[in-house]
Amino acid sequence: MLLKEAIALTQCIGSEQTQLLIEGDIIVPDSKPDMRMLLRTDAAARIERGEISADRVSFSGKLVIKALYLAKGSEKPVHSLNLSAPIEDFIQIEGANRDMWADTAAEIAHIDYKMVNDRKVNYRAVVNISVGVHAKTSHDVVVSVDGLAESHLKKSRHSVCRVIATCSDVIQLRNDLPLPPGKPGIVNILQSDARISNKEVKVQNGRVAISGELLIQSLYTGDDGTIAEFAEHETPFSGFIEAPGAKEGMQADVTLAIADLSINIGKDEDGEDRVFAADAVISANLRVQSLGEVVLLEDAYHINKDLHFTRETVKFPRQICRNKNQCPIKEIIQLDDTCPEILQIYQASGNLFVESVKLFEDRMTVEGVIHADILYIARDDDTPLYNHRSAIPYKQTIEVKGAAPGMEAFIDHSIDHIGFNMLSGKEVEVRYLVCFTARVVDNRAVNVISDITFTDMDKSVLDKMASITVYVVQSDDSAWSIAKKFNTSLDDLLEINELDSPEAVAMGQKLLVLKKIAV
């Protein structure tokens, strides 16, 4: 009797990439003064929803743009603009259906801004969209044969990485962030930004615990009449995502993004406007994986019977390595002659982009660029506030034991810390601590046995076999394959040749083989 087992696996059905051109205008609202010059622009693309239908993945999200500008003839020289433009499209992926799930990601490849006039800014953004569709599959495979001795069965062990749960949820954070002593009170919030750092993930029974820090940076108009003020706060966050089937000891890949951020003016205990009331929504896309092992029947033989195997090729995703690596990136930024000199730096920020991931033997290289922004008070009465942007290339080598070209590489990244030193009126040293989490998967094709039929061996073939054979071991032989070839048992082969174990067989060795006939 055949003993079968249903092997549950995760298969990649297909993956595709596309580029979208998104363009439009940012209009200055009537409540704000005319623009004299753009100071700083920042944009992010987010996919908020993905839906699978037959051979197709539809997605939607938004392009969020924030801008600071210097105003014409206004008592308040610095103002901000915000825009949210929809992203909506689809990608054809053959074989996709509603029972599967999709991983979607968006990243801005390039964006241009052009002041059309003092009330309008035109933008053109190229957004890269990547989509991968995955499915849980089950394969009934033969793992043993009842009634056959173990010595007649050839089995093999295979590591396998299974997806246990995929889910999405949000973590909400509400916190009052007071200004430190010595900072002027808040009159108007010009712009607020946030980034996630020091992410920690722990799988528990039925859920995943997620924690980290939200670094919130706010530029505001103070009550002391200065051009602008800058405040920075770190606030911890934590939450749980329900993940049916998850158990302690499993692994989880979590992608976090700031889906919404609202910063309002709040009052302190004295009733003064010295508090930033932060309300943030952090989206979490979660995948829980189990690393295990399956034992499969690779081959078998029966004395005096022919075995006919039905086989199919199945891809077993096997995690080769998972590695967390911190990379310090330091650069001295030199301002060109068109930039005014620095009087005081408000903020150094940066967005990290991965442009290339390559696998080599036991290592991975990650290359990309950090778009660094330096916002500062300038030694220039006409341009009191200025922002300088520069591109900092980086290349990081990460050790990933067992990796090889042709395997799949996955990389998650975050900037956990940003520091800076003003070296002179034209030079700034910036320091970024980047965290890379690398994962390498080998989708190894395995020939599994799905069925076996038994027929009596042709008697004429048995009769032609010599009763006693002296066999010289070849390079690709094993004790098991020799026993199968000559219709004998492995135990008898070892006993007759006084061998302690099957591993004692060596190339060129002469073995005495006796034909065995079942009664």
Image (cartoon, helix red, strand yellow):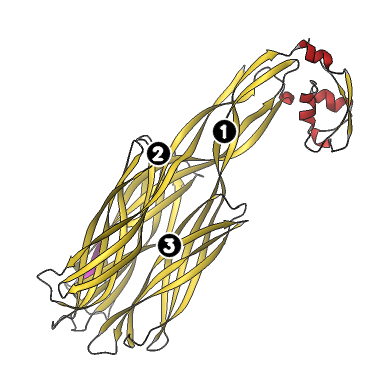
Mark 3 and mark 2 in contact? Answer it, CB < 8 Å: no
Read off the magenta span. Answer: 273-278
Assign a secondary structure to mark 3: strand
**Is 113 positioned to the left or the right of 202 in the image?**
left
Q: How far is disc 3 from disc 1 in space, using C-alphas?
A: 38 Å
Q: Nearer the viewer, mark 3 or mark 2?
A: 2
Q: Quadrant of the N terminus?
A: top right
Assign a secondary structure to mark 1: strand
The residue to which callout 2 is attached is 94
* The quarter of the displayed image where residue 454 is located: top right
Q: How far is disc 3 from disc 2 in space, using C-alphas?
A: 33 Å
Does the rendering let one see residue 63? yes
The residue to which callout 3 is attached is 414
Quick one: label 3 or label 1, which is nearer the N terminus? 1
Q: Main secondary structure of the magenta part?
A: strand
Q: Quadrant of the C terminus?
A: top right
**Residue 10 position in % (x across, y down):** 48, 38
